[in-house]
Image: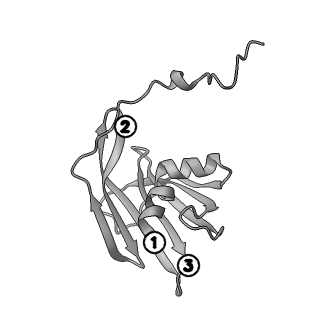
Amino acid sequence: EQLVELFSSDTAEAMLAGVKEGAAIELLGRRVLAGRDQPTEIRYDIFEVSAPVRSSASGRERLKRYFYDSATALLTSTHYIDEAFSPRVAVEISFSDWKQQNGSAYPYRIDRKENGHSVFSLTLSSIVALPRQDSTTFAQSPLRGSQEE
């Protein structure tokens, strides 16, 4: 279930899909300086999203914080409290080692921590990505008909 949630709602694409489907979103801060214990001065754009838990049929909602590196606009981590367990579990998903493939960026390392303890790490050795599509291809759907009527 953790892996299903990771790929269904912890990624940047899933966050945007949730917002498109009506999830509540709030910008908490732009260019927020990382904690003093960080080795470099990384700044983050932080978004908070409340959306249904996609990996569960319970219908419950979950509040998540998405941290984007302000300089690269790449997702660095997703944080939330999983209340499905007793006691509740603080979850942090980290995305790192980003690489470009056919015009898109992909994290080659994904780590999950629960209550500050490492639960799993996923390290990719390669990604096969199709070439980026021209967005104008999707501008006019043949199902919607002509806009010139």
Looking at the rendered structure, the secondary structure element under dot 3 is loop
Give how far across and how far down residue 97 sits, in percent. 28, 52
Residue closest to the far top: 148
Q: Residue at x 55, y 26 (%)?
A: 138
Marks 2/3: CA–CA distance: 34 Å
**Is 43 situated above or below 129?**
below
Which residue type does callout 1 highlight?
A: Val
Which residue carries the number 1 mark?
Answer: 91
Residue closest to the far front: 143
Q: Which one is nearer the viewer's eye here, 10 or 94? A: 10
Classify residue 45 as left or right of residue 102.
Answer: right
Looking at the rendered structure, the secondary structure element under dot 2 is strand
Which residue carries the number 2 mark?
Answer: 104
**Is 58 situated above or below 18?**
below
Give how far across and how far down residue 13 sits, in percent. 49, 47
The quadrant in which the C terminus is found is top right
Marks 1, 3: nearer the viewer: 3
Give how far across and how far down residue 27 sits, in percent. 60, 53
Q: Residue at x 52, y 87 (%)?
A: 87
Classify residue 20 as left or right of residue 125.
Answer: right
Which residue type does callout 3 highlight?
A: Ala
Marks 2/1: CA–CA distance: 27 Å
